[in-house]
């Protein structure tokens, strides 16, 4: 059934939707077809106006185009819209939303065919672009030539390639990605937008594929200048993903061989930046072949392990993805031994002399490390 021949919806059993031509669109439909748990549902409403939505209790939240929150579920409902390129970058668009915009019009403005499928209240799928066939064929394919107008679509494609790692990318879609790079559209991406997609891609089971896709179409150096992406970095990141590490650990593994200036370009949160800053130093200390209580203490102090033991443990776990000789249970015992030293008792015994306190405290911690 095509979008234009679909009957009006019956309201989904929801009084707020009664009589509205509303469809679930995008990711929730795609994931259901893939047999995956569906996340938040996005809705598109055809033939309505902002006044109609407000009269039914929906709260407007859209800025550039009309988006509303359901009065009870707080799910997002967007009026069907079209978009026209009006300037550079991903913000250079003029949107039109009105009763004259059909569901097919709305689906044609989307990025990938697998994201351009709608489901009506009776369960019928509206699939004017062949997204269902591409899901069955495991192919990520652009909706149309307008793909090259929005550089965010390149980032989303790379992120979806990481999430759906068993999907191939249509060759013609990769060609359009190269066009985005060649024409300079990708340079209009702001760091905050790049980070949003990077963060999502890093938390997939195969985050390295996101970087591979960006590198393949020539975009990686443009969106993440200074990032070193090679086989060693890829292997460490893959290991971290397989172990279920958090975003900060994965980011640190990604950036461990990169220039410090990368941090300013990606604008990652402080927790991610901290681990990315500290991991190279920890790896360097572990590589120094120093196996003594003094070297162990130096490493723990270098990452402020006494005050931030959880961060130290996260760093050591990330380091273990790069080096096979990092024995995490042993390091946990070393950290516990150092933290068990009673700093207050040492200070009292030193009579309050700062220099003596420092030396005596280090000596006590070394004894504790030697004892284990």
Image (spheres, rainbow, N blue to C red):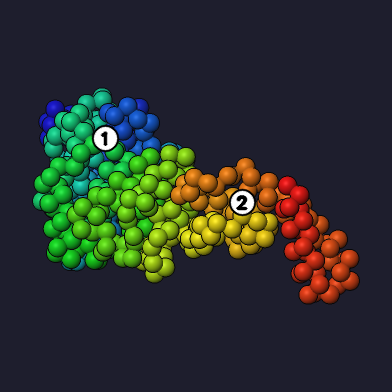
- The quadrant of the picture occupied by the N terminus is top left
Judge left or right: residue 171 versus residue 274.
left
The percent position of residue 142, horizontal first and vertical second, equals: 16, 45
Q: Residue at x 24, y 44 (%)?
A: 48
Tell me: residue 133, above or below residue 75: above
Is tag 1's residue or tag 2's residue first in the polypeptide sequence?
1
Tell me: residue 345, above or below residue 69: below
Q: Residue at x 48, y 53 (%)?
A: 248
Residue density around tag 1, few if under 14, some if 14–19, many if 20 or more, within 10 Å:
few
Judging by the rendered image, the residue that carries numbered circle 1 is: 166
Judge left or right: residue 65 versus residue 253.
left
Q: In what element is the residue under mark 1?
A: loop
Judging by the rendered image, the residue that carries numbered circle 2 is: 310
The percent position of residue 300, horizontal first and vertical second, equals: 63, 58
> In the figure, residue 57 lies in which quadrant?
top left
Q: Residue at x 14, y 47 (%)?
A: 173
Which one is in front, 57 or 354?
Answer: 354
Q: Residue at x 80, y 66 (%)?
A: 360
Which one is in front, 154 or 146?
Answer: 154
């Amino acid at each position: 059934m095509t979008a234009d021949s679909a009957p009006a919806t019956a309201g989904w059993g929801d009084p707020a939707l009664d009589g509205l031509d509303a469809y679930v669109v995008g990711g929730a439909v795609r994931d259901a077809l893939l047999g995956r748990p569906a996340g938040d549902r996005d809705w598109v409403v055809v033939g309505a106006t902002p006044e109609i939505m407000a009269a039914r209790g929906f709260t407007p939240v859209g800025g550039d185009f009309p988006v509303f929150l359901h009065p009870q579920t707080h799910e997002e409902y967007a009026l069907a819209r079209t978009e026209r390129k009006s300037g550079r970058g991903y913000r250079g668009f003029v949107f039109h939303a009105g009763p004259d915009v059909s569901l097919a019009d709305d689906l044609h403005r989307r990025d990938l065919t697998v994201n351009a499928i709608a489901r009506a209240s009776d369960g019928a799928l509206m699939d004017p672009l062949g997204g269902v066939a591409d899901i069955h064929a495991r192919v990520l394919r652009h909706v149309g030539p307008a793909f090259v107008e929005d550089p965010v679509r390149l980032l989303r494609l790379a992120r979806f390639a990481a999430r759906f790692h068993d999907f191939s990318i249509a060759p013609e879609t990769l060609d359009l990605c190269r066009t985005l790079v060649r024409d300079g559209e990708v340079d209009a991406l702001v760091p905050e937008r790049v980070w949003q997609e990077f963060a999502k891609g890093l938390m997939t089971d195969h985050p390295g594929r996101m970087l591979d896709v960006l590198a393949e179409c020539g975009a990686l150096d443009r969106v993440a200048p200074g990032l070193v992406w090679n086989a060693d970095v890829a292997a460490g990141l893959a290991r971290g993903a397989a172990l279920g590490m958090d975003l900060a650990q994965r980011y640190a593994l990604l950036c461990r061989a990169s220039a410090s200036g990368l941090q300013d370009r990606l604008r990652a949160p402080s927790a991610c930046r901290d681990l990315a800053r500290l991991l190279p130093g920890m790896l360097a200390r572990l590589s120094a072949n120093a196996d003594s209580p003094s070297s162990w203490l130096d490493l723990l102090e270098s990452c402020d392990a006494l005050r931030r033991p959880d961060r130290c443990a996260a760093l050591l776990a990330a380091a273990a993805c790069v080096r096979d000789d990092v024995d995490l249970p042993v390091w946990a015992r070393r950290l516990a031994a150092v933290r068990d030293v009673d700093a207050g008792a040492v200070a009292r015994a030193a009579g309050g002399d700062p220099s003596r306190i420092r030396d005596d405290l280090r000596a006590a911690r070394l004894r504790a490390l030697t004892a284990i």
